[in-house]
Image (cartoon, rainbow, N blue to C red):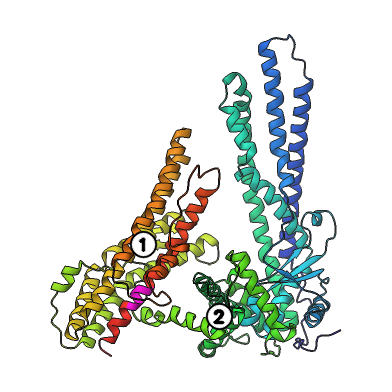
């Protein structure tokens, strides 16, 4: 039955719009040949090593003595180890099922199924076996059983991320789903499953280290009379891995080339159902939609740290999108007209890609493909939510799934929507103020002098506002070289990813191409960090002195000094935790790349536990300050809990490497680093807000 909400499709489509071009067929043929070659090589390797095992068992050892017995045992064990090395990866091919999604009941979501069935009918794609929803901004197709799909015509499944429903209109939603069903209709999707399986095998053979490698290491470390065979097969394993590494790169080049063609063709399928504009405007909206969704889930997590839970995060995500709707429409109006038809959403230098399309061709290339030729179609601006039944219940269920799967939390108390909106408002209240200062405080520390130096500072100025504006102009000049470096950093990343037409970038007189772009990127990072550390010291000093003297005129200097003292304490802790993390990682790198004893590892484990637990000593310094509330942080207890769960670093006992506690410690330190960054920005925002109030 046709969905009553199905948007209109374009008429008078040119013949062969979705036909596979010769370039597609050529790349598909190359990919098939690469896969066949791999499986021939792999099966040959397994058979050859199987014969080696047989020969090791049956060959005549001649006279029986200690040496021949050792040779016999060593050759058998070595051959068996090689055979196990080649064969074990087959058993690692698993049919992974995402846990962050919900299967939809066809009877309860009939309108959605009718909508999807209509797309299948229009695109000529087979109907999916199941439709799932997950919380995020995405949509994808997959085999219901990847392993069986290598041998049997297995049905596919469609997964729709509810995050895309909030940010697209009905025509754009139809275009995105049609794009995914474009993959359903492609026979090359089968090629993709073979390549994924081949890549899994090759990747694990090259890079994976498991119990087999541990056993080989143990064997090599034993008496030379027993370990000689282990030392003999070690170079063989190395050669196999090096050969496979070359093949791995070749296979990925073949698939990357085909994948680009697959995406272009899937876009053509979307155009055949929705016109040229819908898929391109969807890409444009999804870029910002992904940012909005990340913000929503981030607020969800931060609120959960205060035991504040909300039933439906999609309501707040929709409100955030609605708040920015006028701004988005203004930007849309300013986009240039495309002479081929519609708007020019992406220019040649705009290669941004939303996360769900991160492996796809650049957006400007997809735009060119979508408008060659341009297909006009009426746009349905209504919301896709109307084809979902009982939206609120579905959104609440997915919100609870986020708490469980993403945060490992179980809600105990729900706040009203208004309470959560107030939390978000407090969390973002100083964003505009930070932007007013060119976001200069985002990637650097605020250099606050010693309190005595601040108190003794003297500044002569006419009006506070005039002096502030002067400092803001100076700040723009200071940030200009940093922004120039960041533009080059972005270009370097695009060159590395192959998402730009540029072949190189020049920095300090040196051209950096793809083969040395990493070195150029590292040089950019070093110079940017140097500018952050050195360029703003005098500016910060002048800025602080000016604000202190103005606060003193109005008898508000004590409050400002307390804000400065609090920020210094926060910054000191932030630096301490970064130093702790870097120290652990540097020592870990040393241990992994040098010969160490078990005693060295145990000693390192003890050091890690000590420096981790010692962070509590630094946390106690917050008890010594006159705490001034920050947005969503009312007191010192909440401050500590915002840095580390329960406000204290747990003391670990026993070995931390075998129990997985080492990774737990690293994760907790990393989370604390991110939390400190958030709190530091709140603190700077509070300082700027107070200083701003001095001239209001």
Q: Residue at x 57, y 71 (%)?
A: 353
Residue 692: x and y in percent read 29, 84
Type of secondary structure dominating the magenta stretch? helix
Q: Quadrant of the N terminus?
A: bottom right
Marker count (numbered): 2
Placement of 394 over or under 83, stated as above or below? below
Q: Label 2 crowding class (10 Å Cα cut-off): few <14, some 14-19, many 20+?
A: few
Marking on residue 355: none
Is residue 222 visible in the rendered image? The answer is: yes
State the SS at label 2. loop
The foreground one among 545 and 122 is: 545
Placement of 86 over or under 517, stated as above or below? above
Q: Read off the residue under disc 1.
A: 574
Q: Label 1 crowding class (10 Å Cα cut-off): few <14, some 14-19, many 20+?
A: many
Q: Residue at x 41, y 74 (%)?
A: 633
User: In the picture provided, is 88 more to the left or to the right than 613?
Assistant: right
User: In the picture provided, is 7 more to the left or to the right than 211?
Assistant: right
Residue 7: x and y in percent read 75, 87
Mark closer to the observer (1, 2) = 2
Residue 513: x and y in percent read 47, 57
User: In the picture provided, is 672 more to the left or to the right than 324?
Assistant: left
Is residue 374 visible in the rendered image? The answer is: no
Q: Read off the residue under disc 2.
A: 415
Q: Residue at x 81, y 70 (%)?
A: 128
Which range of residues does the magenta coloring cover? Answer: 682-686
């Amino acid at each position: 039955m046709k969905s009553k909400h199905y948007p209109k499709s374009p008429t008078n489509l040119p013949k062969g719009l979705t036909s596979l071009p010769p370039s597609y067929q050529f790349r598909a043929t190359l990919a098939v040949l690469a896969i066949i070659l791999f499986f021939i090589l792999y099966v040959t390797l397994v058979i050859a090593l199987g014969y080696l095992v047989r020969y090791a068992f049956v060959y005549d050892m001649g006279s029986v003595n200690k040496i021949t017995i050792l040779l016999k045992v060593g050759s058998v064990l070595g051959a068996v180890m090689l055979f196990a090395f080649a064969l074990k990866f087959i058993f690692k091919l698993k049919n992974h099922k995402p846990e962050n999604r919900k299967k939809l009941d066809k009877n309860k979501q009939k309108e959605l199924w009718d909508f999807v069935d209509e797309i299948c009918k229009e695109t000529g794609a087979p109907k999916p076996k199941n439709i799932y929803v997950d919380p995020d901004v995405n949509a994808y197709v997959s085999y219901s059983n990847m392993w069986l799909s290598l041998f049997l015509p297995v049905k596919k499944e469609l997964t729709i991320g509810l995050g895309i429903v909030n940010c697209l209109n009905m025509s754009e939603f139809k275009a995105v789903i049609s794009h995914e069903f474009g993959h359903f209709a492609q026979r090359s999707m089968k090629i993709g499953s073979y390549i994924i399986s081949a890549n899994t095998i090759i990747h694990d053979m090259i890079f994976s280290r498991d119990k087999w490698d541990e056993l080989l290491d143990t064997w090599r470390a034993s008496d030379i009379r027993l370990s000689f065979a282990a030392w003999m097969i070690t170079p063989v394993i190395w050669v196999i891995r090096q050969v496979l590494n070359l093949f791995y790169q070749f296979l990925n080049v073949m698939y990357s080339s085909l994948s680009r063609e697959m995406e272009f063709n899937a876009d053509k399928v979307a155009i055949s159902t929705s016109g040229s504009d819908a898929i391109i405007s969807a890409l444009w909206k999804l870029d910002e939609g992904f940012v909005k969704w990340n913000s929503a889930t981030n607020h969800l997590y931060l609120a959960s740290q205060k035991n504040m839970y909300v039933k439906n995060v999609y309501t707040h995500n929709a409100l955030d999108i609605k708040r920015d709707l006028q701004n988005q429409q203004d930007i849309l109006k300013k986009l240039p007209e495309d002479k081929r038809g519609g708007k020019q959403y992406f220019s040649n230098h705009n290669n941004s890609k939303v996360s769900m399309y991160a492996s796809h061709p650049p957006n400007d290339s997809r735009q060119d493909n979508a408008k060659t030729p341009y297909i006009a179609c009426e746009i349905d601006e209504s919301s896709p939510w109307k084809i979902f039944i009982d939206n609120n219940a579905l959104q609440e269920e997915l919100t609870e799934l986020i708490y469980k799967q993403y945060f490992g939390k179980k809600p105990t108390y729900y706040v009203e929507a208004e309470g959560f909106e107030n939390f978000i408002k407090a969390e973002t209240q100083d964003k505009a103020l930070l932007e007013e200062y060119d976001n200069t405080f985002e990637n650097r520390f605020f250099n606050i002098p010693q309190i005595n130096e601040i108190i003794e500072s003297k500044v002569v100025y006419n009006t506070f506002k005039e002096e502030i504006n002067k400092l803001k102009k100076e700040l723009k000049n200071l940030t200009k070289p940093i922004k120039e470096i960041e533009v080059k950093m972005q270009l370097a990343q695009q060159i590395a990813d192959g998402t730009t037409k540029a072949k190189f970038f020049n920095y300090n007189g040196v051209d950096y191409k793809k083969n040395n772009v990493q070195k150029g990127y590292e040089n950019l990072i070093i110079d940017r960090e140097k500018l952050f550390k050195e360029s703003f010291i005098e500016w910060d000093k002048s800025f602080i002195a000016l604000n202190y003297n103005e606060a003193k005129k109005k008898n508000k200097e004590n409050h400002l000094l307390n804000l400065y003292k609090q920020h210094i304490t926060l910054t000191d802790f932030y630096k301490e935790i970064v130093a702790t993390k870097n120290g652990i990682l540097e020592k870990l790198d040393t241990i992994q790349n040098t010969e160490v004893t078990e005693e060295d590892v145990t000693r390192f484990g003890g050091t890690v536990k000590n420096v981790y637990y010692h962070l509590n000593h630094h946390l106690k310094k917050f008890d010594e300050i006159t705490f001034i509330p920050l947005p969503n942080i009312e007191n010192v207890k909440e401050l500590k809990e915002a840095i580390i769960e329960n406000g204290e670093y747990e003391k670990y006992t026993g070995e931390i490497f075998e129990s997985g506690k080492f990774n737990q410690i690293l994760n907790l330190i990393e989370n604390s680093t991110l939390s400190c960054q958030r709190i530091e920005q709140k603190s700077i925002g509070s300082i700027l807000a107070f200083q701003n109030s001095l001239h209001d």
